[in-house]
Amino acid sequence: MVRPSLRVAKTRKVRTPSHTKIRRIDKRTKRPHCSQCGAVLHGVVFGHQSKVRKTSKSERLPSRVHAGYMCSRCLKSGIKAKARATP
Ligand SMILES: [Zn+2]
C-alpha cells in the first residue's frame, strides 16, 4: 500500500449548492525527471490533471527528440557518444 502522502489521487469532499456532499478525486502528476541523471525536466507541464489536459500539445512537451524522458545535457552526450562509436 502506498503511503498516503505519496498518493497521486486524493479525494476531497465538496458541498454543492443543494447541500449534497460529493467526493471528488483530485489527480495530479508529479515533476518529470530525467531517466539518466534524475534532474527535473524543464518545459514539461505537471500538476493537476485538469490543468495538464487544458494545455495544448505543444505547450506540454518540448518538440525535441526524447523530450519528457531525458534532459538536454544527457541527450547531447548520448548523441555524441553514438556518433563517435559508429565508424
Ligand atoms: Zn539527465
Image: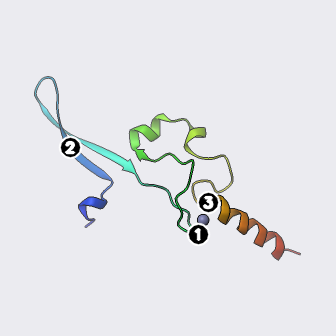
Question: What residue appears at the point 49 percent right and 56 percent down from the top-left corner?
Answer: 32
Question: What residue appears at the point 64 percent right and 57 percent down from the top-left corner?
Answer: 66
> How far is the residue under mark 1 from the one under mark 2?
36 Å
> How far is the residue under mark 3 from the one under mark 2?
35 Å
Question: What residue appears at the point 57 percent right and 47 percent down from the top-left corner?
Answer: 43
Give the residue at the far left of this rendering.
19
Q: Quadrant of residue 19?
A: top left
Task: Kindly check if marks 3 and 2 are in contact, taking CB atoms under 8 A apart as contact.
Answer: no
Where disc 2 sits, the SS reads strand
Q: Local crowd at mark 1 within 10 Å, few (<14), some, or many (≥20)?
A: few
Give the residue at the far right of this rendering.
87
Residue 53 percent coordinates (x, y): 46, 38
The amino acid sitting under disc 3 is: Cys
Badge count: 3
Residue 11 percent coordinates (x, y): 23, 46
Which is nearer the N-term, disc 3 or disc 2? 2
The amino acid sitting under disc 2 is: Arg
Question: Height in image: 50 above or below 10?
Answer: above
To which residue does mark 1 refer?
36
Q: Is mark 2 within 8 Å of ligand 1?
A: no
Task: Kindly check if marks 1 and 3 are in contact, taking CB atoms under 8 A apart as contact.
Answer: yes
Q: Quadrant of residue 77?
A: bottom right
Which is nearer the N-term, disc 1 or disc 3? 1
Q: Is mark 1 within 8 Å of ligand 1?
A: yes
Viewer-nearest residue: 40 or 28: 40
The amino acid sitting under disc 1 is: Gln
Question: What residue appears at the point 84 percent right and 74 percent down from the top-left corner?
Answer: 86
To which residue does mark 2 refer?
12
Q: Is mark 3 within 8 Å of ligand 1?
A: yes
Label of residue 6 in the image = none
Image quarter where the N terminus lies is: bottom left
To which residue does mark 3 refer?
71
